[in-house]
Image (cartoon, grey):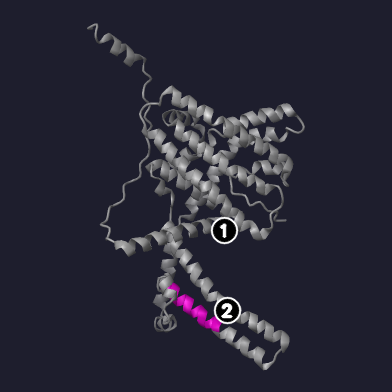
Amino acid sequence: MPSALRPVVAELANEEPAVVEIVPVEEPPVVMPVPRLGFFGSIRAALNWCFGVASLFVGLAVLAAIPVGQFLALGYLLEASGRVARSGRLRDGFIGVRTAAHFGGVAVAVLLMWLPLYFLSLQAEAAQIIDPNGRIARQWQGWLAALCVIGGFHATGALLRGGRFRHFLNPFNVPWLIARAKPSLYTEARDRLWATVVALQLPHYFWLGVRGFVGAFVWLAIPLLLLAQGHRAPALGVLGGLMLAAVVLYVPFLQVRFARDNRLRAYREFKQVRAAFRRAPLAFAFVLWVHLLFAIPLYILKIEVIPRDLVFLEGLMFLLFIFPARVLGGGAYARGTRRAVPRAWVSRWFGRLAVVPIVLAYVGVVFLSLHIGWKGVTGLYEQHAFLLPVPFVAWN
């Protein structure tokens, strides 16, 4: 071998081999020609998208306040991070925004229709109190009953015509419904309703949420069990805190890997997570900061019992804090799997040291919640950063 090539060969021999992870890629969608919307059309599409995002968060907040619906909410968050991890595009994490905008428009239209009925009900109630069974009270009750019937038929016609907001503004929904009152109308409405429900993929999100919960809970159970004994046996509490600090380094990205591959076995593949971290250490450190930092303020809500009427607002707050962390986690993992070689050792060690403060702060807050939270030891297992968006409320 020529002497000039010997240093190059020796350097290549000592270089760490590249580890390229095979990432499942979804089938590319068929690209259809997009019509030009123009200036006002673009503004309308942007406003519709923003309204869809708001409607999506409201719908997920409602699910987060329901025991069974919590698995659907968790499944949606996992699916969002998994799609971003597969594609590398953050916008793919906003799933079903257009559908949410449609349902949100229906909810707003129904709410606007309900306001006159509410006003008439107040007047009818007041008339009934002043003159029970009097002529004025009977008139108000008659107007209320008539408006309820007409409003019901109007809303039914609007839903059958497509359920868009503009359909609720059409004053001829009742005549249209009467003219189309045929058996075929029921069959068509039934098929459209079934197609809409199937398109929501509720079983998929529920099953993904259940398995995502189980996989994360297996990692967290032992550290939390030991941490719960800290007030009785300080040594066990310290051991549990150290174990929890090590576990939270991996659980968010193990969940992303699980959602990306849709395999429960992915929770055992922490070596692959370490390899992805080595190829994107700064992105992983930033995401872990966001994930844990956004979860810490939610522990303030555990100090006192939250009234049931505020459960919806608590679920909405949870989503506003945790959803960005889930989407960014998918983006960081996609970044780590698409690079061929690890970053320089300086970047890797900086990423490792950068997460130490936030991890210690998170473990400290979790331990502190054991003593100041109204649920006590039970509150430790409500790890809303990784598990279910448990409502901070007493239901009994």
Residue 240 figure quarter:
top right
Q: Looking at the image, is 244 positioned above or below residue 382?
A: above
> Of the residues shown, which amino acid type is indicated by label 2?
Leu
Drawn side of residue 352 relative to residue 334, left or right: right
Q: Secondary structure at mark 1?
A: helix
- Judge whether residue 169 is colored magenta: no
Residue 62's disc is: 1
Q: Which portion, as a residue range, is magenta?
A: 147-160
Residue 275 figure quarter:
top left
Could you say where residue 194 lies in the image, as x and y percent from the top left?
44, 64
Could you say where residue 354 lies in the image, as x and y percent from the top left?
52, 30
Residue 117's disc is: 2
> 299 or 203, which is in the foreground?
299
Give the residue at x 39% y 42%. Answer: 86
Q: Which of the two discs, 2 and 1, sits closer to the camera? A: 2
Give the residue at x 68% y 28%. Answer: 238
Q: Secondary structure at mark 2?
A: helix
Quadrant of the frame with the C terminus:
bottom right
- Disc 2 residue crowd, few under 14, some 14–19, many 20+, Cα 10 Å: some
> Of the residues shown, which amino acid type is indicated by label 1?
Val
> 175 or 181, which is in the foreground?
175
Give the residue at x 67% y 82%. Answer: 125
Is residue 266 something one can see in this rendering? no
Cα–Cα gap, marks 2 and 1: 24 Å
Give the residue at x 53% y 52%. Answer: 72
What secondary structure do most residues of the magenta stretch adopt? helix
